[in-house]
Image (cartoon, grey):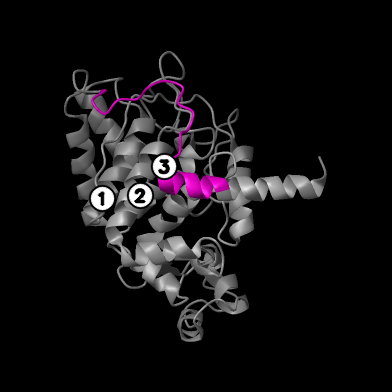
Amino acid sequence: MSARSKKINNMAYGKLCLLLLILSGLSLTIHAKLSSNFYSSTCPNALTIVKQEIAKAIKIEARIGASLLRLHFHGCFVNGCDGSLLLDDTSTLLGEKTANANNNSVRGFEVVDNIKANLEKACPGVVSCADILAIAARDAVVYYGGPFWKVKLGRRDSLTANRSAANVFIPQPSFNLSNLTSSFATVCYKLYVVLGLCGHTVGFARCTSFRPHIYNDTNIDSAFAKSLQNTCPRSGNDNVLQPLDYQTRFRFDDKYYQNLLVKKGLLHSDQQLYNGNKADSLAKKYAMKQGDFFKDFAKSMIRMGNIKPLTGNNGQIRTNCRKPN
């Protein structure tokens, strides 16, 4: 097959995924069945413990819930939802925390530590770190006013990480629609549209992530770009933060999409959802129908959580999420 034919086939595949997920749902390969009542007898208070810790953490720092949602997303797209992102580097293990898309970006590990410690007191060696991330992401979204969904549970934790895969499969803020389609062809591009971007209805980004967009791009409102340039100069202030949704920074809603329609997406990759391409129709739909956005988001979170989970005798239940037992 020629290079041109491969390119055409890849583009067709990405568009097909985009259509199928929105209309009928994506059927990801599930290696074993997860269950929403997996801990009902072995750790009946597990969900309550996680919910209480999430509420406590967000009350202390409002943006931490968005960080936990990001942890779950970035973790699942590298070898599946196996908690590998939580592992610290050691002399024999090169973790994912310092991969390109994670370094100086992913956070919230201390909150996961606290949740794990409380769960270990209540039911030692029962609840996996991978499941904690899945529950925490749901509870954070709900706390911000977003949709509720029943989290499928029963994942086990990996004993290793994959930094090279993290560098390849997690998108960068500079990606365009073609990059996104290519990066996520293996799991379907639409998962990134629904999860990776609309999750940006809450959270913040560093100046280094949005600087190219506000200085070099034309698909951005000029007044919006200028206001951002006041705090993010061409050099310096790299760690200055700006909300991904300038209207309701701590509310999970459809304002993110409304921002895109007037070219006020913070990141280059954000604005790709409304930039004269195939994604425009989805941005318009979600901007006008928050209920549809919430429904699709909840369904997609469940599907993402089903990406290659470790179950049965695979992996382990880590007692410390930062290292194998």
* Amino acid at dot 3: Ser
Which residue is rendered at x = 27% and y = 57% of the image?
Answer: 291
Task: Report which residue position mark 1 lands on.
Answer: 147
Q: Which mark is residue 24?
A: 3
* Amino acid at dot 2: Phe
Disc 2 or 3, which lies upstream in sequence?
Answer: 3
Q: Is 22 on the left-hand or right-hand side of 35?
A: right
Where residue 257 appears, x then y in whole percent? 39, 66
Prevailing SS of the magenta stretch: loop
* In the image, residue 84 above or below residue 170: above
* Amino acid at dot 1: Pro
Where residue 67 appears, x then y in whole percent? 38, 52
Residue at mark 2 to residue at mark 1: CA–CA distance: 8 Å
Identify the image quadrant of the C terminus.
top left
Can residue 247 be seen in this snapshot? Answer: yes
Residue 72 among those drawn in magenta: no
| Residue nearest the viewer, comparing 91 with 59 | 59
| Residues rendered magenta in the picture | 16-38
Q: Which mark is residue 297?
A: 2
| Element at label 1 | loop
Which residue is rendered at x = 63% and y = 48% of the image?
Answer: 12
Q: Which of labels 2 and 3 is toward the front? A: 3
Disc 3 or 1, which lies upstream in sequence?
Answer: 3
Say if mark 2 contacts mark 1, CB within 8 Å.
yes
